Image (cartoon, rainbow, N blue to C red):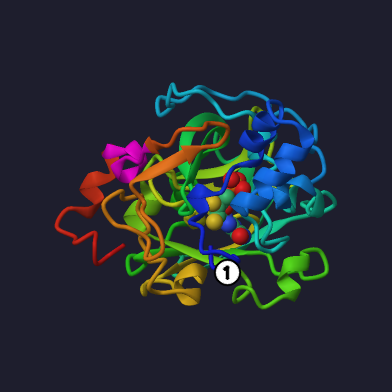
Amino acid sequence: MLIKKPADIPPSDITSKDLYLNRRKFLAGAAIAGTAAATGIGLRELAFPSSLVEANAKIDGIQKSSFNTTEKITPLKDVSNYNNYYEFSTDKYGPAGLAKDFKTRPWTVKIDGLVKKKQELDVETIIKMAAPEERIYRHRCVEGWSIVVPWVGFSLSELIKKADPLGQAKFVEFTTIYDPRQMPGQKLPVLDWPYVEGLRMDEAMHPLCLLCFGMYGEVLPNQDGAPLRIVVPWKYGFKSAKAIVKISFAEKQPVNTWNKAAPNEYGFYSNVNPTVDHPRWSQAKERRLGEFFKRPTLMFNGYDQVASLYNGMDLRKNF
Ligand code: MTE
């Protein structure tokens, strides 16, 4: 996102590994190197290890949800080998290997700020707060790629109701674990650690906003944000913070990490909006991982049911 590339290629124009590997089947070895050298893409991919798909524990009792898209689900191997997780690496193929031994138990989440009772909850207690649901959501990265993932979790509102925030609480802030010994990326000043994200209370309470601990019927792979993350499907992917250790309620709008890093590029709201370009690239289209042709990006990523949350707001100003 903020990483400078040799040539200023919009991230949406960088070929995904999957696409690259498919194309590879049709090209002779020498031709690939030539293509990669000529286009400036693909050389990185040549150096990557083969896909890592870790088998995780199955989650029992998963219920169906009425929020599911019927679009084709992106294969797990693509989703779990192409991750933005700067705590591990700025290279999207890095987190799958680097997060392999990341410890997700024991794990507690601090609930603090403007709540009736500040407390520290074990992740197991949180996971049992409501029945797990499968939510098949579109997920659009600000960089121009998208995926369709069957996440497992329940509406964040279930936890918020139990946390019992005070009337003055207008925002919710999510903080990722800070542990540079386990997360090599945190040894580098790429971002101001720990990673922080935030939502307005009505956004956080919207039933689509998911507290997530699984995907594809199994416990979340570490690189996808285990043991607990949020998934906000109508916003660009960076709003969906991974490996959460603190949920805090506040009166003031939180300063989210990417907004702090580049305020003119990444706003607080970050609703998917094809009419508001990123200063360095268009947001009108996206490339689904594994597909060649781009498709139009939809307002709110197609989740029109959230539109009323923004009635009367200028979404160009509040990007
Ligand atoms: N959460 C943390 N803690 N660190 C990160 O670097 N990257 C974000 C988001 N959550 C990120 C994060 C971005 S930019 C995206 S697109 C999504 O995670 C990617 O989620 P995925 O790897 O499960 O697809």
Residue in the image at 73% along x and 28% along y: 58
Q: Is residue 160 above or below residue 130?
A: below
Q: Quadrant of the C terminus?
A: bottom left
Q: Is residue 45 visible?
A: yes
Q: Is residue 261 above or below residue 242?
A: below
- Which stretch is magenta? 296-304
Q: Is residue 227 visible?
A: no
Crowding at label 1, few (<14), some or many (≥20) Cα neighbours within 10 Å? few
Task: Report the side of 41 relative to 68 (left or right).
Answer: right
Residue in the image at 40% along x and 29% along y: 67
Residue at the spot of label 1:
4
Residue in the image at 14% along x and 57% along y: 312
In the rendered picture of this protein, how many numbered marks are placed on residues?
A: 1
**In the rendering, at what x and y percent does residue 227 appear?**
69, 48
The magenta stretch spans residue 102 = no
Q: Secondary structure at mark 1?
A: loop
**In the rendering, at what x and y percent does residue 141 appear?**
49, 49
Residue in the image at 64% along x and 73% along y: 190
Residue type of the residue flagged with mark 1: Lys
Task: Report the side of 162 relative to 300 (left or right).
Answer: right
Q: Looking at this view, is 240 or 174 the one in front?
A: 240
The quadrant holding residue 172 is bottom left
